[in-house]
Image (cartoon, coloured by chain):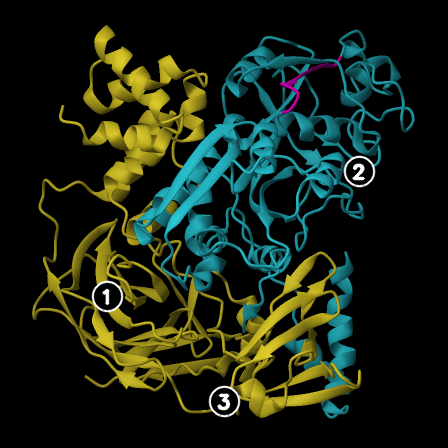
Chain colours: A yellow, B cyan
Amino acid sequence: MTSISVRSRFRGARLVGVPSVVSLVCLASAAWTVGPGLSLAQDVRTDVRTDVRTDVRTRDPGSVVVGGVPAPVAAAASVAAPASRPAPLPLGIMARNTATGVEVVSVNPGSVAQASGLQPGDTIINVGGYQVGMVGDRVYDVGDEVAKHVNAAGQVPLLVRNGRTGALTTIPAQFGTASRAINGVLNAPQGLQVPPTSVITVRLLDVTEPQWRDVALTQGQLPVARGFPVSYRLDPPASTPQHRYAVDARVEDAGHVLLQTTSPVTLASLDREQRVDLTLAGQAAPAPTAVVPSAQIQQWIQTYLGRPPRPYETEVWLADLQQGKSLADVQAGILSSSEYFERQRSNRDLYVADVFRQLYGVPPTPAQLADLQARYDRAQGVRLPFVQQLQQQPR
Amino acid sequence: MKNFFRPLFAAVSWLLVTGGGIGFGQVQAVDPPAAVPAVNANPLADLFTMAYQPKDTPAGAVRLAGSSTLQQAAAHWAHGFHRLHPDVECSIETGSSEAGWKSLIEGKADVALMSRPVTDAEKAAWEKQSAKRLVVVVAAFGRLVWIVHPSNPIAELPWSPETGILRPAAKGAAATADSLAATHWDRLNGSADWKDVPIRVHGRALGSGTRWHMDRLLTGATSCQLATTEHKTEAELVEAIAADKGGLGLVGDEHAHWPGVKRLPLVIPANAAPLADAVAGSDRTPDCRPLFLAVAVPKDGSMSPQLREMLEYVLSYSGQLDVAKDGLLPLSRGEIHAQKDLLGWSMAR
């Protein structure tokens, strides 16, 4: 497999304002930018003719971009896959937003900010000409603006008010061209076919503590359109000293995990570019009797709340599954929602009886109802733990 | 509105930065009009790079108390947070914003869940009683929707920050329906057939956040209280409006789809000034109700590690996902940054 990632950290800025029509023939590879700092490439021969418009803020949130060429995202792309925000570039400061700009509180040794001459007490007024900090009623984040306006050479001018003299100066912040990217290839068992609606997710995880199984610092998603192998690239955010990091991947369809890495692959550090190949294992299709999570969630919403899911409602719950929650947690979430409670007229007795009926298919006996009321009161009327406890008791 | 000037400022300052070496044409090319969010755009999509990154492994307790509107979000926060920090016990006590505030003042809660802003009187009382600094941040928004009887021909409710919906005659006018410019429906829906139908306001009990917002939206800056038929639940309120031809009420968006009522959009003038208590870093319209967390911070600035981690969690993608799970609106990136500023947190950039 030949994999060429055409994504550049600075692509958006370099091609800004150059609309044109191109014919692009990718003989070896096509790559998708699919989220903050992630690109994935697949063996493919593509002939694309389209209008190139590359400013990141004008991209259609429903599309991904190949060097300025929009390509459609499958409808299954979830809440966790923003398409338009570039990966942040750390200046290496602690800062505070103010009405006049971003006040530098401290500067990390060895950082881009220190090399640029920024000092505590300075105020960054604008980045590449764009105001930062509190502007009217909104906050414009300095990290976001740096990522948007850095040029192809890794430079971005900062207009800075010197904290000691009050003088305005322009400081060119220079980001290193050395990449910290994590890239590699995703492999799956040979001959394996996954449904074309499946989605690949690659995550950079903080695994410092054993219970932090799903603390994802960044991730990206891509529809599995053309099979494996697939190359990927992650641009990590700033790391925390003493923390440990790992990469994992999975392939999901409608909330089903079909393939995944058997365990996250631990990284030695996030300070340098590194290659991490990942091997996915599992089954290409769920058992015929397996519950389809997205369909199950939609059914619960319809049954418990008496209406179809709202836009993105199912995706919100699927995103919760990606954070390590279970389908039982989702069910408990819907059964304890404010909306469900209001449907029971915010009445404890009606509510506990109806939750019981939904979970067990029969109304509670008088003795069971008394027990439910006592449990609800012990939970001080906080519904989520009440439902979770009820789910766990033997039927 | 002030944001209108941002591109102009950008162009001028870019010239300053570059010494004029780059022409205006290119400057304009780099700042096309902000993309209009698609209808039903997923508000969480922009938050993914704001993942919760634990800095600490704290132990101890975090006690939350207050508004039932935030109960479910708080329960999700507690559940998600405890999975990551099993040595932190989170307790939730729900009732009203008033009760949460009282618990915070008495030191029985670490976080007060508030579905209305802290009043000036409460802030003044806090200054007298507490040696700690009060910080109030927004954790979510709830969309509010006006509802009327389905036979009412009205299509929308014009609103202004000064006079609200019902246009009180003068600031400080007596708090009676008679003092209002609009007392009968013909003044609002323009139909002579409705001139004898009085506007009957249905609301939640005094003290609830929804009621606080309803009174303010109805009467604007005059802040007078209206004769209101009170209901214990939003379900009861919806049913009352469905049975009352002259009824007008305000409910959470998640209840406005119930049968028997007609939902009305609030029409806000394009140049309306922000409300006096507008949320820092936010340009949301007044039909979005901010939901607050009030915390007491020692004046030396140090917060307990478990409370700090909890607030970091709430103001992250994970915490905002929890908010969306109960039908509330998550914060935007800018709003999250603004809340962190209020907490006095310097942010790594």
| A198 magenta-colored | no
In front here: A368 or A31?
A368
**Which three-letter amino acid code belongs to the residue tagged 1?**
Ala
| Kind of element beneath mark 3 | loop
In front here: B15 or A55?
B15
Task: Note whether A373 is above or below B130 in the view shown.
Answer: above
**Picture coordinates of residue A252 (x, y %)?**
23, 56
> Residue under circle 1?
A249
Instruction: Answer with the quarter of the image where residue B232 lies.
Output: top right
Quadrant of the snapshot with the C terminus of chain A: top left
> Residue under circle 3?
A110
**Which three-letter amino acid code belongs to the residue tagged 3?**
Gly
Numbered tag placed on residue B161 in the rendering: 2
> Same subunit under labels 1 and 2?
no
Do the numbered discs 1 and 3 sit on residues whose CB atoms are within 8 Å? no
**Picture coordinates of residue A116 (x, y %)?**
60, 90
Instruction: Answer with the quarter of the image where residue B252 lies.
Output: top right
**Which three-letter amino acid code belongs to the residue tagged 2?**
Pro
Q: Residues within 10 Å of mark 1 (few under 14, many from 20)?
A: many
Q: Which residues are magenta?
A: B199-207
Q: Is residue A269 left or right of residue B178?
A: left
Task: Note whether B269 is above or below A353 in the view shown.
Answer: below
